Image (cartoon, grey):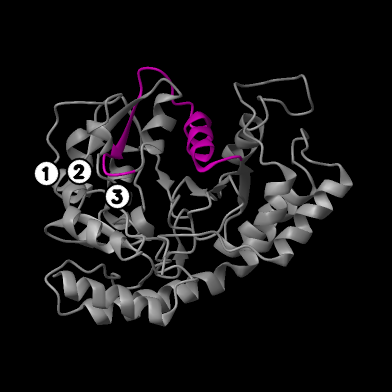
């Protein structure tokens, strides 16, 4: 029995959509609004998350990078970001010449600690980037108050939280810009891809230029941009996937609920939803002592348990600093993610839980 931590779920509809694009010969479009599939996918995104605008790009990292550029953040500027995240969050900041100012997280749901943001704000702070890790939504009320007090825009790194909601509102839509990833390990995929959502028309128009070398009509670059376009094949897959997303999330929620029930009597930190929060359960992440031993034993049983992330960004060689982030360091040594994706069966969940009980 092998149970992967995550796996893309693709069917005949996606294959048919890809074949249709290949037969058409229209693999991409350098037009301002993108190709037919890109435009149709972006409309579906807007309708799903209830944003005014959506701009698709070729990765979640590109979504973050384009958002930072849209805010005119440049060399010498600073962006506050949690260290406990995938390195893409920091890399997107570095790609614009700006500096990541790493801050700590909350143990309860592994998202950015609002108090640590306040302590690190300086005259050079040009954005705050909360990361909705594992699908958990950051404490946006407190972060919003800090943003308003200091007049600093917010970029939501919602790469892992597409479909998660707080008080009925989708993650990624609370502030100026929200970024999602469509990597195969996420709740839905386009192979590679990303999305930026916004309600700000000016930012939307800048994003359209940034993803296409700063152009509007062609050979008329007004601002700096890159080729961040989403190919038509990827958009065709994403169009099918987003229609399936509600069922994907429903299945994840069912599996997460059952797993929490079966693990409830063990000496581990079980992930929970806050009041009015509805998670997509992109990753079901516990915290436990003897994490590495448990990981090894689970994997020996064919259970695709995984650690996200064993090395926080502030300790990765490229960014290595001497700052101390107590909760971040604790999390990097204790977190363990277990499979709950839609291909995980009830029998699989029971096996995972029994294995955990046997080990502990």
Q: Which mark is residue 143?
A: 3
Instruction: Determine the image quadrant of residue 12.
Output: bottom right
Residue annotated with mark 1? 326
Query: Is residue 240 at least partly visible in the picture?
Result: yes
Left or right? Give the position of 62 relative to 2.
Answer: right
Residue at the image point whose x is 40% and y is 30% from the top? 91
Q: Does the CB distance between marks 1 and 2 fall below 8 Å? A: yes
Residue at the image point whose x is 43% and y is 57% from the top? 161
- Judge whether 19 appears above or below 119 on screen: below
Query: Residue 243: percent from the left, percent from the top?
Result: 64, 67
Q: Circle 3 sits in a helix, a strand or a loop, which is it?
A: helix
Left or right? Give the position of 243 relative to 76.
Answer: right
10 Å crowding of disc 2: few (<14), some (14-19), many (20+): many
Residue annotated with mark 2? 104
| Range shown magenta | 58-85
Residue at the image point whose x is 45% and y is 49% from the top? 159
Query: Residue 284: percent from the left, percent from the top?
Result: 33, 64
Query: Residue 210: percent from the left, percent from the top?
Result: 61, 30
N-term mark: 2 or 3 = 2
């Amino acid at each position: 029995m092998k149970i992967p931590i995550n796996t893309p779920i693709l069917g005949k509809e996606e294959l048919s959509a890809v074949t249709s694009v290949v037969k058409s010969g229209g693999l991409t479009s350098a037009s301002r609004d993108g190709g037919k599939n890109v435009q149709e996918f972006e409309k579906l995104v807007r309708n799903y998350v209830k944003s005014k605008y959506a701009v698709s790009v070729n990765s979640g990292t590109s979504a973050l990078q384009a958002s930072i550029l849209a805010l005119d953040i440049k060399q010498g500027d600073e962006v506050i970001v949690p260290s406990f995240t995938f390195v893409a969050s920091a890399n997107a900041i570095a790609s614009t010449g700006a500096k990541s100012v790493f801050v700590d997280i909350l143990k309860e749901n592994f998202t950015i600690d609002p108090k640590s943001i306040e302590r690190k704000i300086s005259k050079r702070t040009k954005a705050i980037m909360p990361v909705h890790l594992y699908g958990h939504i950051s404490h946006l009320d407190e972060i919003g108050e800090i943003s308003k007090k200091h007049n600093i825009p917010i970029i939501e790194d919602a790469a892992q939280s597409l479909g998660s909601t707080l008080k009925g509102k989708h993650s990624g839509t609370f502030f100026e810009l929200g970024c999602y990833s469509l990597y195969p390990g996420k709740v839905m995929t386009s192979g590679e891809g990303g999305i930026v959502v916004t309600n700000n028309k000016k930012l939307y128009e800048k994003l359209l230029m940034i993803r296409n070398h700063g152009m509007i009509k062609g050979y008329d670059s007004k601002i700096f941009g890159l080729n961040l376009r989403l190919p038509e094949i990827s958009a065709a897959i994403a169009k099918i996937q987003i229609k399936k997303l509600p069922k994907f999330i429903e299945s994840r929620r069912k599996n997460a609920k059952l797993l929490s029930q079966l693990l409830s009597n063990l000496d581990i930190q079980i992930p929970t939803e806050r009041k009015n929060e509805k998670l997509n359960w992109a990753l079901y992440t516990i915290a436990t002592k003897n994490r590495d031993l448990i990981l090894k034993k689970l994997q020996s049983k064919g259970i695709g348990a995984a650690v996200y992330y064993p090395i926080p960004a502030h300790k990765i060689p490229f960014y290595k600093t001497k700052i101390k982030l107590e909760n971040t360091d604790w999390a990097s040594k204790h977190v363990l993610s277990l499979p709950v994706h839609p291909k995980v069966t009830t029998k699989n969940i029971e096996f995972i839980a029994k294995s955990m009980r046997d080990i502990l």
